[in-house]
Amino acid sequence: GNTPTNPLPCLLTCVGSTGHGATTWTGYPGRLSTTVDISECQFVSTPIVTTSMNGISDSSHYYMVGMTSPQGITKDKFDIVVMGLVLTAYYPSATYKPTTSDANRWNWNINWIAVGSTC
């Protein structure tokens, strides 16, 4: 890999979660999104971000498409877009389109890790 342009002590790992029952989901059936605020990390440039999504048991959150693909990453925020069930051997004809009500009822939330420069 590349040598960090701003190595320690400027390199920071910052972690968080949007919170069970506290995530604001918007969109329409089959395309939900949320914006995650990472401004408290005080990055000075765009960090590297990795994500996961969890929720209550049996909410099928682990079969959703997009939960691990942050978009529009800036030093202050990023977006997650959840598109519905992925086609698998278990769900060979996936047609389920989650709604904002589903996401809220099942406490879907985004966990994240961001690594970036603070100076």
Image (cartoon, grey):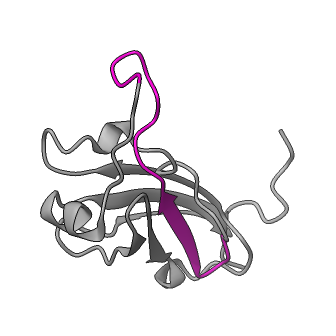
Residue visible at 32% across and 78% down?
A: 24
Q: How many marks?
A: 0
Residue visible at 72% across and 71% down?
A: 46
Start and end of the magenta stretch? 73-92
Pick the quarter of the image with the N terminus.
top right
Task: Tell whether 45 sits left or right of 50.
Answer: right
Q: From where the camera sits, is residue 9 visible?
A: no
Q: Is residue 25 above or below residue 4?
A: below
User: Which of the 4 quarters of the picture holds residue 115?
Assistant: bottom right
Residue 116 percent coordinates (x, y): 66, 65
Residue visible at 85% across and 48% down?
A: 3
Q: Nearer the viewer, residue 86 or 8?
A: 86
User: Which of the 4 quarters of the picture holds residue 32?
Assistant: bottom left
Residue visible at 57% across and 83% down?
A: 42
Task: Tell whether 97 sits left or right of 67.
Answer: left
Q: Nearer the viewer, residue 118 or 9?
A: 118
- Say whether residue 89 is magenta: yes
Residue 99 percent coordinates (x, y): 30, 64
**Magenta segment, prevailing SS (helix, strand or loop):** loop
Residue 49 percent coordinates (x, y): 59, 57
- Say whether residue 42 is magenta: no
Residue 110 percent coordinates (x, y): 37, 60
